[in-house]
Image (spheres, grey):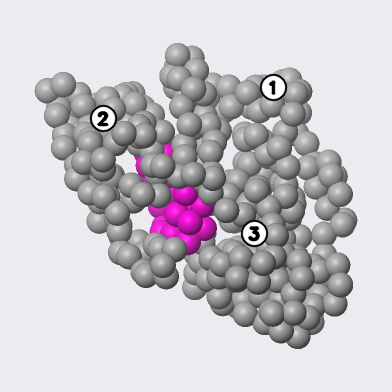
């Protein structure tokens, strides 16, 4: 990616409603997620949902990890058509605030204008309310931070953690829930469970720490003797850390290791030791027997994790509001 395009990517922002990030269930590769993020970064407040978003063929090849040297002429066109058809055919479910389940696809329509080297894409109309006029409950980040990621799990986890930032506390997920959100539900089970942490979580955490504006560490939490939850502690980078992020992205783009970009053990950079060892430690006080007895958001979060881990994440926010508990967001 050229310096001009990198600078442009730094000036483009992706805005998504938190509900779209936290409740959508989909399985997209890193390249496909980058294409969607690129489309979303070009949405304007006045868009109605019927506008096409366009980009040139060489931009598409860069976003999908290909280059002009490996794909030319008919090969490039074939690759383009195959990738976009695959994205168009992938449907996914989202949960509306009203609790209704809606089946969507990211791309509603594709038009290829090879005479002008243009790719024209239109998002699913159902997604527009989750991308425009978002009020306060939305996630906002620079497109630049995900373009050099190689793992789709990295992009997905980065968005999930950014969407949790308003709470000002570590993010908690059941193992089953985070597998579902990362699109690997049913894939890493039984004796294969260790590969979930090695191939999904650890790679994602490493890329987030190296390439983005947040640093993160995670801890596996037990309920009894079994690991049932993952807790992520994260915070924004400042000053020299953001400069190192720029260097790391430049090094990735150039295909070489930048000598001034040190590797950092972010597990030691902030107090991960303060994370809970067991689910019962998540609340400052003993977890109440009933959700109606919870007085703080932390208590309600711990109550749900222990008693109703299968509940939709939206339940937590709505229930907190019903009980008059502060810290549930807007």
| Of the two numbered discs 3 and 2 in the rendering, the one whose residue sits closer to the viewer | 3
| Of the two numbered discs 1 and 3 in the rendering, the one whose residue sits closer to the viewer | 3
Of 132 and 112, nearer the camera is: 132
Question: Could you say which disc has been placed on residue 243 in the image?
Answer: 1
- The image shows residue 129 at horizontal and vertical percentages of 36, 49
The residues tagged by marks 1 and 3 sit, at their Cα atoms, a distance apart of: 33 Å
Of 201 and 237, nearer the camera is: 237
- Element on which disc 1 rests: helix
Image: 67 above or below 121: above
Earlier in the chain: of badge 1 and badge 3, it is 1
Magenta span of residues = 17-38
Quarter in which the N terminus is drawn: top left
Question: Could you say which disc has been placed on residue 54 in the image?
Answer: 2
Our reading of the magenta stretch's main secondary structure is: helix
- Categorize mark 1 by other alpha carbons within 10 Å: few (<14), some (14-19), many (20+): few
Residue at 12 percent across and 23 percent down: it is 115
- Element on which disc 3 rests: loop
Outermost residue, top side: 4
- The image shows residue 195 at horizontal and vertical percentages of 61, 63
Earlier in the chain: of badge 2 and badge 1, it is 2
As for residue 89 lying within the magenta part, the answer is no
Image: 148 above or below 277: above
In the picture of the structure, the residue carrying the numbered disc 3 is 328
Residue at 30 percent across and 59 percent down: it is 104
Residue 98 relative to residue 169: left or right: left
The residues tagged by marks 2 and 1 sit, at their Cα atoms, a distance apart of: 31 Å
Q: Quadrant of residue 5?
A: top left
Q: Is residue 230 visible?
A: no
Residue 246 relative to residue 46: left or right: right
Numbered marks: total:
3
């Amino acid at each position: 990616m050229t310096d001009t395009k990198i600078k442009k990517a730094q000036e483009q922002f992706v805005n998504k409603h938190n509900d779209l990030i936290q409740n959508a269930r989909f399985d997209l590769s890193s390249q496909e997620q980058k294409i969607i993020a690129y489309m979303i970064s070009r949405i304007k407040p006045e868009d109605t949902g019927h506008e096409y978003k366009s980009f040139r063929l060489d931009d598409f090849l860069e976003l999908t990890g290909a280059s002009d040297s490996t794909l030319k002429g008919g090969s490039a066109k074939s690759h383009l058509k195959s990738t976009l058809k695959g994205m168009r055919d992938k449907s996914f479910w989202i949960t509306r605030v009203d609790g209704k389940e809606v089946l969507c696809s990211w791309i509603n329509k594709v038009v290829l204008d090879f005479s002008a080297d243009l790719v024209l894409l239109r998002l699913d109309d159902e997604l527009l309310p989750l991308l425009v006029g978002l009020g306060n409950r939305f996630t906002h980040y620079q497109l630049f931070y995900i373009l050099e990621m190689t793992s789709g799990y990295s992009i997905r986890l980065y968005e999930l953690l950014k969407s949790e930032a308003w709470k000002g506390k570590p993010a908690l997920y059941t193992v089953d829930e985070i597998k579902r959100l990362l699109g690997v539900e049913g894939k890493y089970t039984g004796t294969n469970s260790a590969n979930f942490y090695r191939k999904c979580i650890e790679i994602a955490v490493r890329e987030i720490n190296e390439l983005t504006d947040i640093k993160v560490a995670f801890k596996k939490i037990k309920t009894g003797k079994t690991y049932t939850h993952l807790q992520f502690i994260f915070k924004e980078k400042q000053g020299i850390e953001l400069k190192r992020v720029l260097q790391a992205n430049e090094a990735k783009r150039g295909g070489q290791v930048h000598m001034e970009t040190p590797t950092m053990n972010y597990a030691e950079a902030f107090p991960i030791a303060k994370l809970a060892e067991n689910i019962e430690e998540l609340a400052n006080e003993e977890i109440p027997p009933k959700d109606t007895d919870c007085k703080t958001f932390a208590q309600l979060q711990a109550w749900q994790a222990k008693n109703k881990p299968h509940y939709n994440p939206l339940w937590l926010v709505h229930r907190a509001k019903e009980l008059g508990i502060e810290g549930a967001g807007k």
